[in-house]
Amino acid sequence: MHRCRRIAMHGTDAGNAATDPSWSRAALYSIVTGVASRRRGRAPVAIMSLSRSRFMRAALAASIFCLASGAVRAAEPYPNGPIRFVVPATAGGTTDVLARVVAQHITQSWGVPVIVENRAGAGGVIGASYVVGSKPDGQTVLVAPSAFGVRSALDRKLPYDPLKDLAGVGLMARSPSFLVVSTSLGVKSLEELAAYAKARPEGVSYGSAGMGSTGHLHAAQFAAVYGFTAVHVPYRGTPEAVTDVMQNRVQYAFAPGPNALPLARDGRLLVLGATSAAADKFLPGVAVVNQPGMSEFDADDWFGALVPGKTPLQVREKLSKEIARILALPEVRKRLNDLGAEPQSSTPQQFDEMLKHYVSTIRQLGDQMHITLE
């Protein structure tokens, strides 16, 4: 681009060149073609023998060359340095585990560090806000659970527009949500839990990963459908909520497979039900919570990747294809299946459409259930 600027400046180089248009054109033509002499005394003679159209073609060629070379320099490869996976939840949860599995494989295949950074708080708003404010170059990625979609639907005061300020990269996994209770609670089924709660005028309490999380929505629905009073106790993440369920500080919670199944297999937690029949793959014979009002939307938890809204589509597609490749690896599928999650992928456009539909559906459901976020 510096050379292009020098081309434009030759017409005002010295002496009376600034007032001699023919000399200015001659200088430009001589630089582009090398035909005319650079010496000021001969240049007008050389250029005057050329037609105006030939000069214009030469000048246009010079302009195109400058623009093209500038575009080549401006286009940077992706990835261009370390990638940051931002997890809007605490370490140890499903989102965190999934992000670290994928990050490890991207580091190996692309040869760049992929750093997983937990930015929990405010129901995922802190982590999402950080990504929204990042440069739209694909180097900062939000790995979000379906709780992000629930919060996007129910919180009308978000500091960002989730459907405009963030753009989808792709779906990563799905997991049924499991209703868990303490082994010391003394209940063995969904009906027994409802009867236990109804027998207590003060009601019972349930935990979740925070206000507006998927677990919050599932647990509030369960109480409403079964007709008992329940108090919501929000935590910073699902692992913390499940820990208090084990110790019977709160009576129940809904948790994705990776947070529920390992503890249930160790006998430290009891699973009473799940949000879909897909749970039978991970825990054969588990009851499905499919009472009226509980099956009107896709109740399974999902996990996906998003980037700042103005990130180029080609960058999103490249990252999406790499994530899909990783999720199809047999060792990755087995790792996630063992935890109770099913790897799934999508294109950026498909994920955008899914999120738009999900937010709309949850917003309607929240209005029906009178769930509001302050």
Image: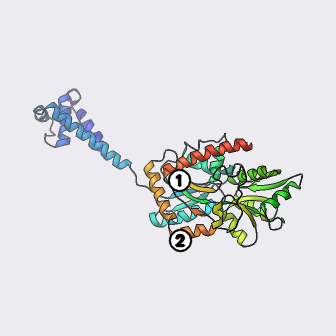
Where on the picture, by quarter, is residue 341?
A: bottom right
At x 76%, y 70%, the residue is: 268
2 or 1: tag closer to the N-terminus: 1
Rendered position, 87 above or below 361: below
Tell me which amino acid carries mark 2. Glu
Tell me if mark 2 has few (under 14), some (14-19) or many (20+) residues whose alpha carbon lies within 10 angstroms of its own. few
Which residue occupies the foreground of this view, 49 or 249? 249
Left or right? Give the position of 281 relative to 216: left
Q: Residue 312: image x %, image y %?
A: 45, 47
Left or right? Give the position of 132 relative to 256: left
Tell me if mark 1 has few (under 14), some (14-19) or many (20+) residues whose alpha carbon lies within 10 angstroms of its own. many
Disc 2, SS = helix
- Disc 1 marks which residue? 140
Q: Residue 200: image x %, image y %?
A: 89, 55
Q: How many marks?
A: 2
Where on the picture, by quarter, is residue 342?
A: bottom right
Farthest-out residue, bottom: 266
Which residue occupies the foreground of this view, 215 or 52? 215
Q: Quadrant of the C terminus?
A: top right
Disc 1, SS = strand
- Disc 2 marks which residue? 331
Q: Residue 38: image x %, image y %?
A: 16, 40
Farthest-out residue, top: 19
Q: CA distance from mark 2 to mark 1?
A: 26 Å
Q: Quadrant of the N terminus?
A: top left
